[in-house]
Image: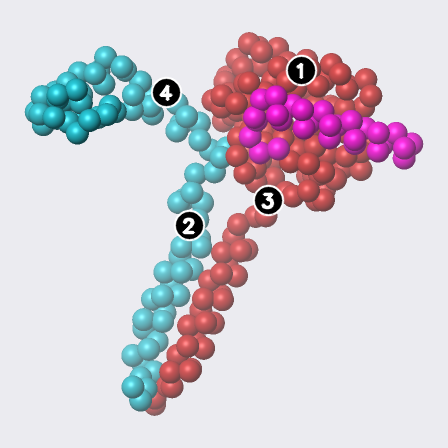
Amino acid sequence: MKGLRKSHLMIPALCCAAALLGGCSSTAAVRVRPWERAALADETMNPDRDPLASAMIEHVYFSREADSGGKGVGGSGCGCN
Amino acid sequence: MVISQSRIRSLLRGYAAAALAALAAALPAQVAPGDAFPPIAAAGLTGGPLPETAGKVVLVDFWASWCGPCKASFPAYARLHAAYAGRGLVIAAVSVDESPAAYTAFVARLKPPFATLHDSKQALVREVQVPTMPTSYLVDRSGKVRFIHAGYHGEQTERQLRAEIEALLDEGAQLQ
């Protein structure tokens, strides 16, 4: 490769710079700080907060997929253990 | 006009360096051992009277009502307060709760014997940049951070705190 024309180089270089510097300005938006986790620590964020609902969902899933025993226990899901 | 490959590499290195410098400037540094702890009186804390910290060994604990280990740490801090307050230890437990009601309810339920304060605007915690919740900072009599405990690990943390507090109190006694 002998070289590139300057006009062809500047556009991708400026795009890269804009993307990098844009990311710098929004770091607060992409990381939840330890003191900002009140909503995340709320009980409603717990996917297993209702054991009965979880059991019913699992029952439907196992029935539909025919993989009884395929979650959280030993065995291959054949239902023989 | 043509540009050589070395010129291209040089340009990209320049852009990368500028991006990294901007990133470093955007993120405030965490308070580390050896740093002066930001003045509590200037942080606009509410929720109770500011404790007198001049010339004292100060344990500043950042907690929240939604944080389980924070709640577990309070009885240990009460024991430390009972053992060392007479020798010059001040415990300032700073809540980072956004809700004043959550702060008030937590303090009313646990009734801690040490000072509790509310950083309702999260200004102090943002300045300190705590790495996790809870985090406690042990500050010596000159206002310098000497030890940092990220998280609360039960008896292990309490044992370490006791040793460190005694060392700092003895250090201060030698100076006086």
Q: Which residues are magenta?
A: B149-176
The residue singled out by tag 2 in the image is A26
- Relative to A55, is A41 above or below? below
Q: Is residue A60 magenta?
A: no
Q: Chain of mark 2?
A: A
| Helix, strand or loop at mark 1 | helix
Which quarter of the figure is the N terminus of chain B placed in?
Answer: bottom left
Looking at the picture, which amino acid does disc 3 mark? Gln
Looking at the picture, which amino acid does disc 1 mark? Ala
Dot placed on the residue nearer the N-terminal end, 1 or 3: 3
Dot placed on the residue nearer the N-terminal end, 2 or 4: 2
In this rendering, the label closer to the viewer, 2 or 1: 1
Which is more toward the observer, A22 or B83? B83
Question: Alpha carbon of mark 3 to alpha carbon of mark 4: how far?
Answer: 30 Å
In screen coordinates, is A50 left or right of B22?
left
| Helix, strand or loop at mark 3 | loop
Dot 2: few (<14), some (14–19), or many (≥20) neighbours within 10 Å? few
Q: Point out residue B173 in the picture as x, y percentages from the top left corner.
A: 88, 29
Question: Alpha carbon of mark 2 to alpha carbon of mark 4: how far?
Answer: 28 Å
In this rendering, the label closer to the viewer, 2 or 4: 4
What number is the disc on residue B78? 1
Query: In the image, which lettered chain appears cyan?
Result: A
Dot 4: few (<14), some (14–19), or many (≥20) neighbours within 10 Å? few
Query: In the image, which lettered chain appears red?
Result: B
The residue singled out by tag 4 in the image is A43
Looking at the picture, which amino acid does disc 2 mark? Ser
Q: Point out residue A7 in the picture as x, y percentages from the top left corner.
A: 31, 80
The residue singled out by tag 3 in the image is B30
Q: Chain of mark 3?
A: B
